[in-house]
Amino acid sequence: MTVLCRLDDLPDGGARGFEVPGLDCKVIVVRKGERVHGWRDFCPHYKGGTPMAWKRDAYLNGARTHIACHAHGAWFDIETGACVQGPCLGRRLIRVPLTIDAAGAVCMRPREERT
């Protein structure tokens, strides 16, 4: 498993991007209470994807209710990754499976363990 951060490092309702060796993009981690959601930092509006933050770790809309692509104005559901507004309706973000271990570390499962 790849440790991305500790749960305590993410404020509730916050998001951060993490570089992961071997991946061609950052991994976005969004915390909602004691749960975390992981997504590849690629907006599906542009073929091949494009990073979504306009500045470091600016992945959420102003109300912090959706992941936002600031380049295209698309909004995505934090829990499902489905586009709910913008030019990529009907598409979704690519999930990155995460777990929280007993010590509170947010971990990305190795590729062979992902479903």
Image (tube, rainbow, N blue to C red):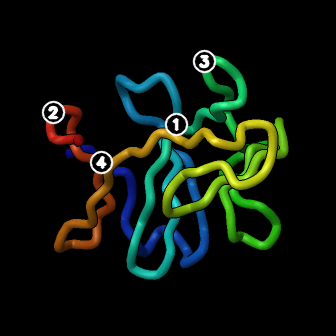
What label does residue 48 carry, if any?
3
Q: Position of residue 74 (x, y in %)?
A: 77, 46
Is 113 left, or right, of 81 in this rendering?
left
**Labelled disc at residue 112:** 2
Disc 2 element: helix
Single out the mark in the foreground, 1 or 3.
3
Residue at screen point 60% across, 33% down: 42
Q: Position of residue 46 (x, y in %)?
A: 71, 23
Q: Position of residue 39 (x, y in %)?
A: 49, 46
Mark found first going from the N terminus, 1 or 3 = 1
Identify the residue position indicated by label 4 in the image: 108
113 sits to left or right of 14: left
Q: Amino acid at mark 2?
A: Glu
In the displayed structure, would residue 66 be above or below residue 8? above
| Outermost residue, front side | 90
- What residue did someone put label 1 on? 26
